[in-house]
Amino acid sequence: MTNDHAEIPSSGSRSSVEPVLLSSVERFDHETDVLVIGFGGAGAAAAYEAAAAGADVLVLERFSGPGGSTAQSGGEVYLGGGTRVQKACGFDDTPEDMYAYLHAALGPHVDEEKLRLYCEESVEHFEWFRARGVPFQESLYEEPGWMAPTKDGLMWLGENAWPYNTLARPIPRGHRPPVEGFAGGLLMERLAAAAVEAGARAHTDTRASALVVDASGRVVGVVARRFGEEVRYRVRKAVVLTTGGFVDDEEMVVDHAPLLIGHGKVSDGGDDGSGIRMACALGAATRRMAAVEAALIVMPEAACRGMLVNALGQRFINEDVYPGLFSHAALHQPSPWWVILDEEGFAAYSERNPTAMPPDHVAETLTELEAELGIPTGALETTVATYNRHAALGEDPLFHKNRKWLRELKAPFAAIDPRILARLAENRREATGISGFTLGGLHTTVDGEVLHTTGRPIPGLYAAGRASSGMHGEGYVSGTSIGDGTFFGRRAGRAAAR
């Protein structure tokens, strides 16, 4: 997939998103029942359902093919409630346990109506993926991680870590296609093919720039640009915005999600908030715009075998939680951040990860390591001494790390610097070690209707995926973006077709 023709203006050269009046449009180049803007996971799900319901469906994609951020993701889908993969691996899950975990992990301030619906219909959603040709291997990956380096179809995503293991029965729910590492490409390939097979047509290299409204305020079309030429689309039923979040728009990040200022971006490069801004130009309401996901560029398999510390040499969380949660916690700590390991811990981590890079700093004593890292003298020594004293007793009273990962750390010591990996991944010298994306967006109903600031639905306008505010509050777990986007994308597609 290439993006040679994608027109992505910088924040300082934005195109206007002011709505266009129907009466001012002399002619339309294309006409359809449902127009989906954005061909990522949410867009593919919306397009499939709308086409399956009998609607004539067009999908506009700014790049040269489908994919979006979904295609570049790990491919995990957070599913549970008793899927056949869970059962095959020996786990008896319920929607209630799934809800209890997600309510805590995605909180505070989750959208309870959306979350409840997602958990209750999760098994059906899993079967929907299978029916669309997405395979899942019936085996479990035991290690904590961002994604499985194996083809296992099920993985833990923090359900067995404190405090979540006290709130719900610990059951793994990270479902993923059988790809070692990044599985988003396979997932998106199958969803895009299903949408096309159902009858949806795609216009690529086409960037939507404004919504067309009639005299009553109903959305009846879209103005777009393709290879520099204006293209106008007439819509008989509805427009569905699945354009992604806004992490690539620096001005919107500064205005709404300042926690991510200066950090890296997790996106396909097209998350510029254009869909959100087009809807807001019609008076659409937004929700949870400050909510973000963060990724500290460390391997969870390494962190749980040692400790995470801030610039003052202090621990701040149990290292076996879902890595997105320890990453979000890091955002509120003095930077930089370090993973502290000993020789035994690094050897165990390297054995399971043959491609593991050597640690960035090694020292015979903690005093030497403190000096090398710029940590205040004695701070790291105190942290490790406290950790070791409790680990010898098999406990962690400060942060409650699972006993499975507890043991005393012994010299020599090593430190892993997340900034080193971030610089390699982001190709920029000033990388902080954290990258992220936005979770907030348009305020929608469970059927994807975009709500006006008055609380009423905007006729003819729907949204799903990261262009909308989904079930998340201020927390995040891997797979909930693809899960949320596809689940509510499906509902938006069906509603739009009606």
Image (cartoon, helix red, strand yellow):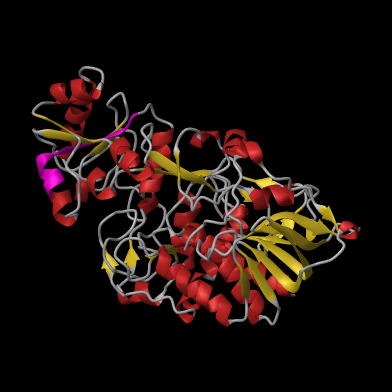
- Does 493 sit above or below residue 293? below
Q: Percent x, y for residue 431?
A: 38, 35
Q: Nearer the viewer, residue 193 or 84?
A: 193
Q: Residue at x 47, y 50 (%)?
A: 476
Left or right of residue 13: residue 33:
right
Left or right of residue 459: residue 297:
left
Q: Residue at x 33, y 29 (%)?
A: 336
Q: Residue at x 73, y 48 (%)?
A: 17
Q: Residue at x 72, y 50 (%)?
A: 278
- Residue 442, visible in the rendered structure: no
Q: Percent x, y for residue 277?
A: 69, 47
Q: Percent x, y for residue 348?
A: 13, 50
Q: Percent x, y for residue 44?
A: 56, 69
Q: Tell me if residue 364 is in the magenta stretch.
A: no
Rendering quarter of residue 168: bottom left
How many numbered marks does the figure carry? 0
- Residue 186, visible in the rendered structure: yes
- Does 403 sit above or below residue 457? above
Rendering quarter of residue 337: top left
Q: Nearer the viewer, residue 22 or 4?
A: 4
Q: Please report the bounds of the magenta region as a residue range.
A: 336-347
Q: Tell me if residue 342 is in the magenta stretch.
A: yes
